[in-house]
Amino acid sequence: MGEIGEWRHLCVDMQRMFAEDTPWHVPWMARVSPQIEEVAGRHPSRTIFTRFMPPQHADAMPGKWRDYYRKWWMMTGEHLPHGLVDLASSLASLVPPARYFDKRTYSPWIDGRLHTILQSERVDTLVITGGETDVCVLATTLGAIDLGYRVIVLKDAVCSSADDTYDASLELLHDRFSVQLELMEAEEFLSGLG
């Protein structure tokens, strides 16, 4: 792994609305939760949990997001029980010292707030976990690469609701971004910290 530098654990969208019985349920989430809990639990002050926040109404969103939330109307704020945007209960107790970062899009980088926070803390490495590998994790990872971060994706701590696109996403990241990104297991990462 080499010298890691100033790092943060960016845990993507490990929220109740994906863990529980909703139209967006990700069955794999339970399988990766122990690894995520281990990383976040050992380093809560370095952990930032992103939360995907649906709008109150579809019409509050721009462009094609409006169509997206017309399709998923039951996941908008006016229909979704409010507590379902919260972190899965096993992770929520880590805040604080862990932090939240709320976002309206797949990527947390769009409005520049997260990058500004990380730059002010002199962060150069991001360790990425969470869901879904082929949607929000992919958007988070590609944005981090674009911004120049060293990226470590913990492959046994990311999940998806579709095996094929999960596999394809990890293969894409490994094959096309090998200079900027490392794939490793959570235990390998933690033991490498010393």
Image: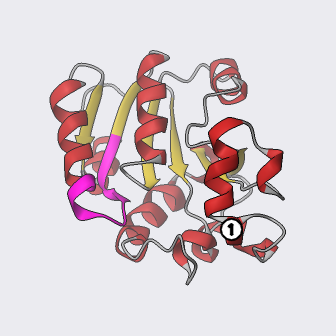
Looking at the picture, tell me which residue is in the foreground, 189 or 110. 110
Picture quadrant where residue 21 is located:
bottom right
Is 179 left, or right, of 80 in this rendering?
A: left
Look at 71% across and 54% down and name the residue there. 53
Vertical order, 60 against 143 (above or below): below
Picture quadrant where residue 14 is located:
bottom right
Look at 60% across and 66% down and name the residue there. 15
In the image, which residues are magenta? 153-166
Q: Is residue 131 magenta?
A: no
**Is residue 40 in sight in this rendering?**
yes
Looking at the picture, tell me which residue is in the foreground, 48 or 19. 19
Look at 36% across and 61% down and name the residue there. 160
Q: Quadrant of the N terminus?
A: top left
* Amino acid bearing label 1: Met
How many marks the image carries: the answer is 1
Q: Position of residue 133 (x, y in %)?
A: 37, 51
* Residue position marked by numbered label 1 in the rendering: 75
Q: Position of residue 105 (x, y in %)?
A: 63, 42
Looking at the picture, tell me which residue is in the foreground, 5 or 70. 70
Picture quadrant where residue 74 is located:
bottom right
Vertical order, 125 against 183 (above or below): above
Q: Is residue 163 magenta?
A: yes
Crowd around label 1: few <14 · some 14–19 · many ≥20 (10 Å):
many
Tell me the element at label 1. helix
Q: Position of residue 26 (x, y in %)?
A: 44, 71
